[in-house]
Image: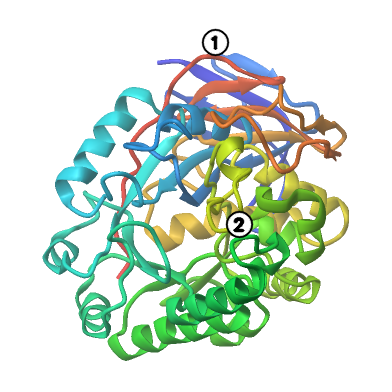
Amino acid sequence: MSTLALINARLVNEGRIVDADVLIRGERIERVGAGALPPGAAVVDLAGKHLLPGLIDDQVHCREPGLTHKATLATESLAAICGGVTSFLDMPNTRPPTADRALLAAKRAIAAATCYANYGFYLGATNDNLEEIKAVGPDDACGIKVFMGASTGNMLVDDPGTLEEIFAGAHLPIATHCEDSPLIWENERRFRERYGDNVPIEAHPLIRSAEACYKSSSLAVDLARRHGTRLHVLHLSTARELDLFEAGPIAGKRITAEVCAHHLWFEQSSYATLGAKIKCNPAIKTAADREALRAAVRDGVIDVIATDHAPHTLEEKARPYFESPSGLPLVQHSLLMLLEQHRDGLFSLEQIVEKTAHNPAVLFGIVDRGFVREGHYADLVAVDLGGTTRVDAAQVRYKCGWSPLEGTEFHAAVDLTVQNGAIVYREGAPTGVRAAQALKFRGRE
């Protein structure tokens, strides 16, 4: 059994920053703190760099199966570990949609053979798969994804009776995409009347409006309260929606909220330079919305920070407004984005770790991950807050080959990623080691 010692680290974990060594034996952490090193241990001197638990991204779209010209589980998980994301939860809107347990098993088989990061998968809700939703358990999926807004194929759940039954009958956490489709369709109609098919990208946050978000989010919260459902509302984008959620630690919460890195980074003026590269659903909105979301992270109203990593090709993004798909690739750079905002005084390192590692593990009942604890799996990332990382096309690991952050110079660098006790990324490059495992979920009643 291999032994790895990470020494002279500044450990950021469970609300504290302390000097510590971490001894890893096999795939688990044996000791946190000083002590004699066993003979033959491989030693990495972090020389004061900060050591964090590996990030758990609870919302990614790896596009496999069926959309592999954009991305695959292999390519996007490799990008993830290069950015310190050691675990991810993948969304079901693939082709075909992951809407039954057989398709979940097929996805897990692909991941077992190809993934570089630990993986889990959502079951997608539809208007007609209620029996699958009732039957699925933590051995099958991390949660139930409900698109309460415009989506692709059969993934839009818009029947009120079906929504009631899903919220009443699900045994796993429900994660919702909340936008009201009728409001969006009416906004599209009005803009088509004015512009035809040449709607400017700046109209996107007006079409996928704050009103459409709030109407859907408030419905989801009402359903969850009436049925006692464990609800996680994904990618909040407006200040108004924050009134639906309570501040405080995640323990005991049955209704939780997420924000994505791009809604904390970009705001409405960014469309002028980036155009459809930052077209996403829900839309990036005003600077005031962004500031409210940042404050909600600090105040404990927002529980989780994720990416909604959703790659498309540049050719697809270059199409006219109604044909250009929504989504942007972020999983390689989300930690660097947050560290830059830490440098700017927006978030503490302890808050970043809580929202990207601790809370996702607690929320989804992920077994023995998300914390630097003795006995837990050794998923860790070391970052150099004195380093630099410039994003360019050559640095990007996504299959789509681009990032909306190209040209950005971050004042930090990911130095080392350890996954299940193995070094998988070091000093700017993946090591080629594939140490990923299927995540295990204990459920959270």
Q: Which residue is depicted at the point 83% across and 39% down?
A: 408
Image quadrant in which you'd find residue 23: top right
Marks 1 and 2 in Cβ contact (< 8 Å): no
Q: Earlier in the sequence, mark 1 or mark 2?
A: 1
The total number of labels drawn is 2
x, y percent for residue 97: 28, 50
**Position of 317 relative to 424 (above/below):** below
Write down the quadrant of residue 7 in the picture: top right
Q: Amino acid at mark 1?
A: Pro
Q: Secondary structure at mark 1?
A: loop
User: Which residue sits at x=46%, y=24%?
Assistant: 25
Q: Position of residue 361 (x, y in %)?
A: 45, 54
On the image, which quarter does residue 127 sit in?
bottom left
Q: Nearer the viewer, residue 19 or 170?
A: 170
Residue at the farthest top position: 40
Residue under numbered circle 1: 39
Q: Locate the C terminus by quadrant.
A: bottom left
Q: Is residue 149 left or right of residue 346?
A: left
Residue ID at (20%, 57%): 137
Cα separation between marks 1 and 2: 62 Å
Of 304 and 72, nearer the camera is: 72
What residue is pinned by disc 2? 321
* Amino acid at circle 2: Tyr
The answer to which of 193 and 339 lies nearer the viewer is: 193
Badge 1 density bin: few <14, some 14–19, many ≥20, Cα 10 Å: few
